[in-house]
Each structure stands twice: as structure tokens, then as C-alpha cells.
Image (cartoon, rainbow, N blue to C red):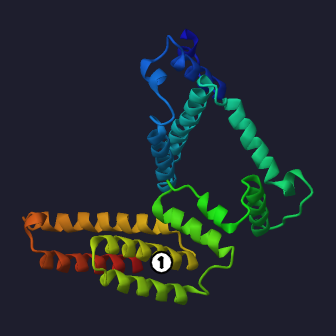
Amino acid sequence: MVKFNKKDRYDFDDLVKIMDILRCPEGCPWDREQDHASIRKNLIEETYEVCDCIDRSDLAGMCEELGDLMLQVVFHAKIADDGGEFTLTDVTDGICKKLILRHPHIFGDVKADTSDEVLKNWDQIKRVEKHQTTFTDTLEQIPACLPGLMRAEKVQRKAAKANFDFADVTEASAKLSEEIAELAAAKSPEEACEEFGDVLFSAVNVGRLMGLDSEEAITGATNKFIRRFATLERACMDAGKNISEIPMQELDTIWEQIKIKEIHNEQD
């Protein structure tokens, strides 16, 4: 164990060895107690932290967070190995075989000169791999634990490959208006929840047909709200007031002024 404290630089094999030490009988009590379920959320959190660094163009942070994400892969593989389920080699073997199989234009004699042709081949091979004989199979195998908007968009894209799709954005927008009207007419909380889900699903359809990413759009809208709210609160504090004590009508007037100023600054 001591030798790991004296290395100037570590590689992937060192990470695997360190995890072996942490999980051994004389290792770390916490690491030995973990199972797939107990560290599931860690895997999700680390993935989002990598994405956050990408969004902020933070390469140093991205390097660090990719290491944290890599640790989660090695951790899960070690837990599986300890339980006789599968090994880290099984994991790397599986992904290597998958990459070779799904790139027949590189490792075989299939011709694919464009990205569209590559993706078409990828989908066809994936359906065979996963024994998807119907389009419903492709929809049902999309993970239910994906973020809601992301899952909705993936489901819609798969359905579109079966030619089940709106002709254009105009049709999709009309459907969105219809769903909004149904939400307004809901008679119970349960009905409102269902109709609200339909509104969100329809909004994703509109964005998809406009070539927009729904998750990116809602993230951008949320960030914009936080930015403008911060400006609003600063304005209130500069006026010697507490934002929570100001009537909503007055706050809304200030909010609109903030929006107008922001738009003008973006145009300059």
C-alpha cells in the first residue's frame, strides 16, 4: 500500500489496484459496505458534474470530474467482481466488441460516407443486438430513469422513425395549443397532472421539430430566470427594500424593465 504514496503519476491500472485495496478485508469499511444501489446516485451526480464542466468550458474541472466518473465505473465493476457477477475486463471487452460491431464501415466492408448513414447503420445493428423486433420494443427499452424531457424527445425520435410524427412545426404547435386548452379545462388535480404532462410532451415535440434540445432549452430558461431574479433582488436591495415585502405587481414591473434592458444589451 505504501508504494502508492510515492508515485509521481498514476495510470488506470493504479486506479484498479487502489479500488482492490479499498474493497479488501483490511481496506476501507465504507467502501466495503457499498453495493450497486447505495452508490447509484453517485454515478448520476458525477455524470452531471462532468456535463456542468463541459457547459462552462472548464477543462481543468472536466479532467477532474471525468476521474470521479471513471472511479464510479471501476467501483461498480469491483462490486460486481466481488459478487461473482462480472469483471472490469468483461466491461471493457463488451464495449470494445460493441464499438467494432457498430462500426462496420471501419472494421468491416459496409460503406457509410456520411454521419446519417453511420447513424442509420448504428440503429439497425442496435435493434438486432437488443432483439428489438418492433418499434414498440425500441420505445420501451429507453430507460425510464432518464430526465423527463430527454426521455420524451428520445421516444418521439424513435416513433418518428416509424413515420409516426407531425408533418411540421405548425401541426405540432397546434397540438400544443390544444393540450394547453385541455389543461385549463381540467376538473381535478389528477386530470390537471395528466394534461400538464401532455403539455410538456407536446412542447418537446415542437422543440424537436425546430431542431432544439429540450433539456438544453429548459436549462437555459432556468439559468436566465436565476440571473434576472438576482438582478431584481439587487434592485430591491439598492432601494432599501426586502424583495419578499414588495407587491408582486411592482416586482413584475421591475422584472419587465430588466428584460428590456437585457434585450437591448444583447442587441448592442
Q: Is residue 184 left or right of residue 50?
A: left
In the image, is residue 16 above or below residue 169?
above
Please state the horizontal and vertical placement of residue 211, each as a whole percent of the image: 58, 75
Residue 230: % across, % down: 24, 63
Q: SS of the residue at dot 1?
A: helix
Extreme right residue here?
109
Image quarter hosting the N terminus:
top right
The location of residue 133, given as percent across then percent down, is 74, 62
Q: Amino acid at mark 1?
A: Ser
Instruction: From the image, tell me which residue sits under label 1.
Output: 202
Q: Quadrant of residue 123?
A: bottom right
Quarter containing the C terminus: bottom left
From the viewer's perspective, is residue 38 above or below residue 172?
above
Q: Is 81 located above or below residue 262 in the figure? A: above
Q: Nearer the viewer, residue 218 or 41?
A: 41
The answer to whether 6 is drawn above or below residue 147 in the figure is above
